[in-house]
């Protein structure tokens, strides 16, 4: 299968979408014919932004890229991948501490959907410390978030 027909699903809660997420989406867009950024709705979590708000902000942030689309989904990631026609689930790994959880999820997703691959990408080293949780905490206390999130997200925070 060539790049011309490979679809990658990049799922996450993205509350908020950071420049680390944006970096990974662009890296993936160079590797796959289509990247679907899938905004998860987790009713067990209290989110800062609604799924619709997150989708709108991410669409604005990735707008220049022709092969990146943004959707909202509920339920299992493997079901979303099947619906989108994705052959690969993309996950970001910032540090070794991320790997254990991501490895468990990858194995479970493989069990649920054996033909679906999982690819781990590392962000640029500039973003290895960055997380949505840290961004929200900085914003909550009036700290400077410029350069940590796309401009559309910065305006909303």
Image: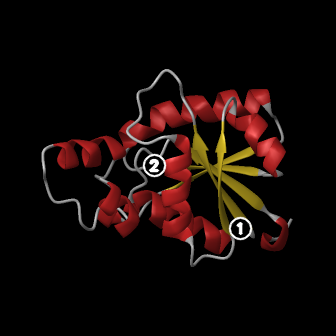
SS type, badge 1 = loop
Visible residue check, residue 129: yes
Quadrant in which residue 75 is drawn:
top right
Q: In the depicted view, which residue is nearer to us: 35 or 129? A: 35
Instruction: Provide residue 58's location: percent of width, then percent of height.
Output: 51, 59
Q: CA distance from mark 2 to mark 1?
A: 18 Å
Task: Give the left or right position of residue 59, taking residue 74 as reference.
Answer: left
Visible residue check, residue 116: no
The earlier-in-sequence mark between 2 and 1 is 1
Report the residue marked by disc 1: 32
Residue at left 43%, top 61%?
Answer: 123
Residue at left 40%, top 49%?
Answer: 16
Quadrant in which residue 41 is drawn:
top right
Residue at left 43%, top 42%?
Answer: 49
Instruction: Provide residue 85's location: percent of width, then percent of height.
Output: 83, 51
Residue most extreme to the top: 44
Q: In the depicted view, which residue is nearer to us: 117 or 34? A: 34
Render colour scheme: secondary structure
SS type, badge 2 = loop
Looking at the image, is 105 positioned above or below residue 115?
Answer: above
Q: Which mark is residue 93?
A: 2
Mark 2: few/some/many CA within 10 Å (<14, 14-19, 20+):
some
Looking at the image, is 38 positioned above or below residue 104?
Answer: below
Residue at left 78%, top 35%?
Answer: 79
Q: Which mark is residue 79?
A: none
Q: Locate the N terminus and report the quarter of the image it occupies.
A: bottom right
Instruction: Provide residue 139's location: percent of width, then percent of height.
Output: 21, 49
């Amino acid at each position: 299968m060539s790049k011309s027909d490979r679809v990658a699903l990049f799922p996450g809660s993205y509350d908020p979408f950071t420049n680390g997420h944006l970096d990974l989406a662009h890296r993936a867009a160079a590797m796959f014919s289509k990247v679907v950024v899938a905004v998860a709705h987790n009713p067990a979590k209290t989110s800062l932004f609604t799924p619709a708000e997150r989708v709108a902000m991410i669409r604005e942030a990735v707008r220049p890229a022709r092969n990146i689309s943004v959707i909202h989904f509920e339920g299992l990631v493997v079901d979303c991948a099947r619906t989108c026609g994705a052959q690969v689930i993309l996950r970001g790994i910032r540090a070794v501490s991320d790997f254990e959880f991501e490895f468990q999820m990858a194995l479970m997703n493989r069990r649920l959907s054996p033909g679906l691959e999982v690819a781990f990408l590392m962000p640029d080293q500039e973003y290895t410390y960055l997380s949505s949780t840290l961004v929200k905490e900085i914003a909550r206390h009036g700290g400077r978030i410029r350069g940590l999130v796309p401009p559309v997200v910065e305006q909303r925070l």
